[in-house]
Amino acid sequence: MEAYRSKTKVRMHDGIVGAIYLLSIILAFTVNIQWLYLAGAVAVLQILSTFTGFCPVYFMLDKMMGEKKTKTAGAKPL
């Protein structure tokens, strides 16, 4: 499991996931209620990443920004 992430990546991850949740809710109210499945899929991925250590958003951020790592708040060193 990844114990270290840059604070910038953590903030970007939180912003991306929050934007997806918000977009899903807005689209559910304005377009079609089935857009809530998007929010459900993101929630399932967040829960699964707790056990697997893999998060698609962090995967993409690591590819785009490199592997510079610093200790995050609450992370335990391995």
Image (tube, rainbow, N blue to C red):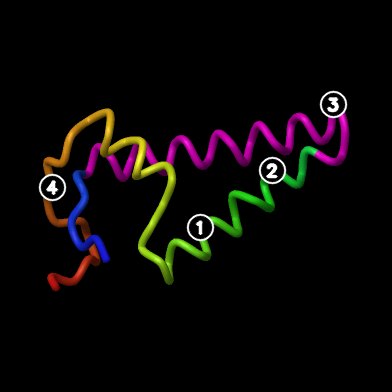
Corner quadrant of residue 7:
top left
The CA distance from mark 3 to mark 2 is: 15 Å
Residue under circle 2?
Answer: 38
Q: Is residue 6 above or below residue 51?
A: above
Magenta stretch encompasses residue 23:
yes
Q: Kindly report which numbered mark, 3 or 1, lies closer to the viewer in this rendering.
A: 1
Which residue in the protein does label 3 denote?
A: 30
In this view, 27 is above or below 41: above
Q: Please state if 4 lies on the left or on the right of 54 as rendered.
A: left
Q: Position of residue 11 (x, y in %)?
A: 33, 40
Residue type at numbered disc 2: Leu
Q: Secondary structure at mark 2?
A: helix
Mark 3 or mark 2, earlier in chain: 3
For the residue labelled by badge 1, is the local secondary structure a helix, a strand or a loop?
A: helix
* Extreme residue toward the right, this view: 32
Tell me the residue at 22%/30% (across/down).
65
Q: Residue at image x 87%, y 32%?
A: 32
- Which of the two discs, 1 and 2, labels the residue nearer the N terminus? 2
Q: Which residues are magenta?
A: 7-34
At a point 36% along the width and 36% down the height, the residue shown is 60
What amino acid is found at the position of numbered circle 1 in the picture?
A: Gln
Horizontal placement of 17 versus 60: left or right? right
Query: Separation of disc 1 and disc 2 at Cα?
Result: 12 Å
Mark 3 lies on a secondary structure that is helix
x%, y% of residue 66? 18, 34
When asked about the image quadrant of residue 58, the answer is top left
Distance CA(mark 2)–CA(mark 4): 30 Å
Disc number at residue 69?
4
